[in-house]
Image (spheres, grey):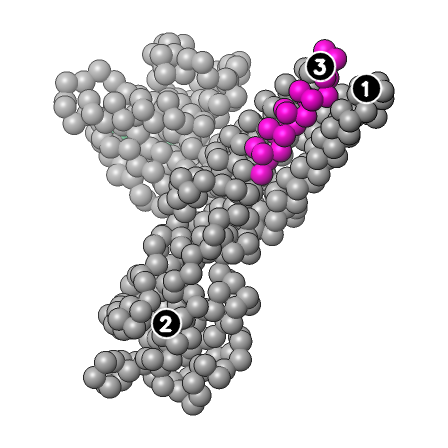
Amino acid sequence: MKTPENDTISAIITPHGEGGIAVIRLSGPDSVRIADGVFQGNISLHDAKTQTVHFGSIRGGDGTIVDEVLVTLFRSPHSYTTEDVVEISCHGSMFIARRILELLVKSGARPAGPGEFTRRAFLNGRLDLSQAEAVADLIRADSVASNSLALSQLRGTLSKKISELRGRIIDLCSLVELELDFSEEGVELVGREKLLNDLLSIRGDISQLIDSYEHGKIHREGIRIVLAGPPNVGKSSILNGLIRENRAIVTDVSGTTRDTIEETVVLNGIRFNIVDTAGLRETRDIVEVEGIKRTKEQIIHADMIVLILDATGKMEVDHNLRVFDEFLEGRSHKEIIIVFNKSDLLDAVRTRQLNGLKLEYGTVLTSAKTGAGMRELEEVIGKLVNPENGKVAGETILVSSVRQRDNLQKALDAIDLSIEGARNGVSGELISVDLKGALSNLSDVVGVDISDEVLNNVFLRFCIGK
Ligand SMILES: Nc1nc2c(ncn2[C@@H]2O[C@H](COP(=O)(O)OP(=O)(O)OP(=O)(O)O)[C@@H](O)[C@H]2O)c(=O)[nH]1
Ligand SMILES: [Mg+2]
């Protein structure tokens, strides 16, 4: 565990801008003294009990009243950071909030850095690192799925699982090591068979956690869908249809969209980031060329591609697929949906033809103009998302950061070495080295004995006031 820092920090913890109230937080050993220096209420905070709220005013250096405020006192350890915390709620003007912050800094508080309150909560042992990461995720949550995932992690589901795994490895480790003490006598305390089975079971659990990262990513960041296709087929109209808003400009001029446009829609609790792109075609227009370059980059980074074609076009499906082959290469068919748009312009024969098309991709016939087929498109998109990912059950354990996943991967590699050792009859001594490696990797997931560099990286994701 790192040594906790012990100065007193302060920051405005509400969003910058006008609001009903703004809150300035102080945390550290001098919080109460510093707050008392600027606050005038019925009692001095020095004499107040923990978790109490007090009405009064904040006075500037020259004695003038800056604002009327409510002050909330949290005495150590009953606070977010476990230190003495004072929160001053003033009227929601940034000007007033900054003036109060300045007064607190003049009285000895240090302006807090990004994520510093949460960092202290971690350093003081109130949260482990995976829970601290969950705080950042929770603040960013914008769908039911990302909300429940972050909350479940904050409540320690991942931490509990890691601690259970560590317990199982420690048990194995001590048995293997005890065996070493008796090695002269040739005593085998854990049968090799049992050791191997236990290791395989631990391996299974770690590997499941690693796999859960991809699911976690979907809940946190959403799924990136890129709408691509030739110009004028109705890509922007379909974007507008999906987000139910006239966001992108639609005209009958080919090459209307020149830059990428990204919008978010939540379907069935999952967030989709939908990107409308410039139509792909040969062109000399430099703006359009740049737009097309961006389209190609978007296609590379998409989780899912909706290739939109004009349903009234000649039998151009094969041709278009060939043109798009270059971008779609290496993609599983599951990640591509083909949409034939402008179905309202089709005659019955052509409609039948298109409906009868047997392609390896999911296909949908739509009319962005009348709305026909749009619901079906949403359903096809929804079905491509693994149904398992559609819901986050109350206590599902999902790994949510690359950092956590990488440490789990290292633990898995170490367990694999120990499995190999156990299979090849390697001595307990060597097996215990690998097991200890795995233990330390698992500790890193929750941040026991973590380096400053890793810590700084984690808290970079926070903003000031968190
Ligand atoms: N009849 C009919 N017209 C449509 C439909 N969808 C789009 N359009 C029309 O087709 C034209 C092009 O639509 P956009 O949505 O701008 O097409 P786009 O693919 O974004 O075009 P670019 O941005 O130029 O690549 C516009 O005049 C739309 O009104 C449809 O389903 N039926
Ligand atoms: Mg467009």
Q: Nearer the viewer, residue 291 or 229?
A: 291
Mark 3 or mark 2: which is in front?
3
- Front-most of residues 30 and 366: 30
Mark linked to residue 184: 1
Residues at marks 3 and 2, CA–CA distance in whole angstroms: 65 Å
Residue beneath disc 3: 426
Q: 69 above or below 288?
A: below
The part of the chain drawn in magenta is: 422-443
Badge nearest the viewer, 3 or 1: 1
> Is there any visible trace of residue 126 in the rendered image?
yes
User: The residue under label 2 is which amino acid type?
Assistant: Ile
Main secondary structure found in the magenta portion: helix
Q: How far is disc 3 from disc 1 in space, using C-alphas?
A: 16 Å
* Disc 1 packing (10 Å; few <14; some 14–19; many ≥20): few
Check disc 2 and report its element: helix, strand or loop: strand
* Residues tagged 2 and 1 counted as in contact (Cβ below 8 A): no
Dividing the picture into quadrants, the one containing residue 272 is top left
Classify residue 162 as left or right of residue 196.
left
Is disc 3 placed on a helix, strand or loop?
A: loop
Q: Is residue 252 above or below residue 245?
A: above
Mark 2 or 1: the one toward you = 1
**Residue 164, horizontal then vertical, whole percent:** 70, 40
Q: Residues within 10 Å of mark 2 (few under 14, many from 20)?
A: some
Tell me, yes or no, whether the highlighted magenta stretch contains residue 237.
no
Q: Where is mark 2, residue-wise?
A: 21
Label 1 element class: helix
Where residue 190 appears, x then y in whole percent?
A: 82, 25
